[in-house]
Image: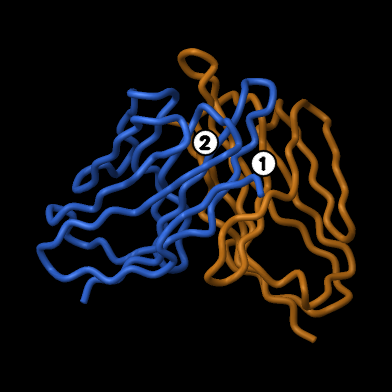
Chain colours: A blue, B orange
Amino acid sequence: DGGITQSPKYLFRKEGQNVTLSCEQNLNHDAMYWYRQDPGQGLRLIYYSQIVNDFQKGDIAEGYSVSREKKESFPLTVTSAQKNPTAFYLCATSGTPMNTEAFFGQGTRLTVV
Amino acid sequence: ELKVEQNPLFLSMQEGKNYTIYCNYSTTSDRLYWYRQDPGKSLESLFVLLSNGAVKQEGRLMASLDTKARLSTLHITAAVHDLSATYFCAVTTRGQGNFNKFYFGSGTKLNVKP
């Protein structure tokens, strides 16, 4: 199946731990994004990547890190520096300039315990 | 920085009624998108509006775009309970290397009462 796969669906983190959220796509899209959504809120951009080995900070990058070693993969690490990481995390991709619609994964719900 | 504002943020309506959700954005944008999100779920694409005057319809939902007014509307006709969800609009700006950065509104939470 073509699409975007995020894993895990649910993730629990202890205080002071780093955790990594996976995002894999087989749509052959160049651009990938990570968004954070808090309850009852809109989406806020954490990081985005236009191409392999390149990524840019979004609006709320502090406490997060990413890598883009392969076109298909854009993992997000939530570090211990992120003071309030409990949220719903969405990965998205978009394709060519002629077809710029963003497609979203199913999301990962991260909870600090 | 491009700003996207939706209103209303909350909308409670009876089945069978009509209503409109508004999406304003602050600077020139290439394209406008509408998404639907069910509770605890991801975002589902509804419409992509590419040019001034564009109108698209799917079932009881119709979206339009006025780029001069920087305004898009999502009109709901004869609402049914299944339309209850949160609706987001988003716009893109063309960046370096044809990269499109997305800006999302805060969402409109729609509750259609039987």
Nearer-the-camera pick, B5 or B55: B55
Question: Looking at the picture, does residue B15 appear above or below residue A83?
Answer: below
- Could you tell me residue B5's position as x and y percent? 55, 47
Q: Residue furthest bottom?
A: B114
From the viewer's perspective, is B2 left or right of B6?
left
Label 2 sits on residue = B102
Question: Looking at the picture, does residue B36 appear above or below residue B26?
Answer: below
Q: Are marks 2 and 1 in contact (CB under 8 Å)?
A: yes
Q: Residue at x 41, y 44 (%)?
A: A34
Q: Reading the chain from its start, which is encountered first: label 2 or label 1?
A: 1
Classed neighbour count for the residue bearing mark 2: other residues with Cα under 10 Å, few (<14), some (14–19), many (≥20): many
Disc 2 to disc 1, C-alpha distance:
9 Å
- Could you tell me residue A21's position as x and y percent? 34, 54
Amino acid type at mark 2: Phe
Q: Which mark is residue B33?
A: 1
Q: Residue at x 43, y 47 (%)?
A: A23
- Could you tell me residue B56's position as x and y percent? 85, 42
Q: Residue furthest left?
A: A16
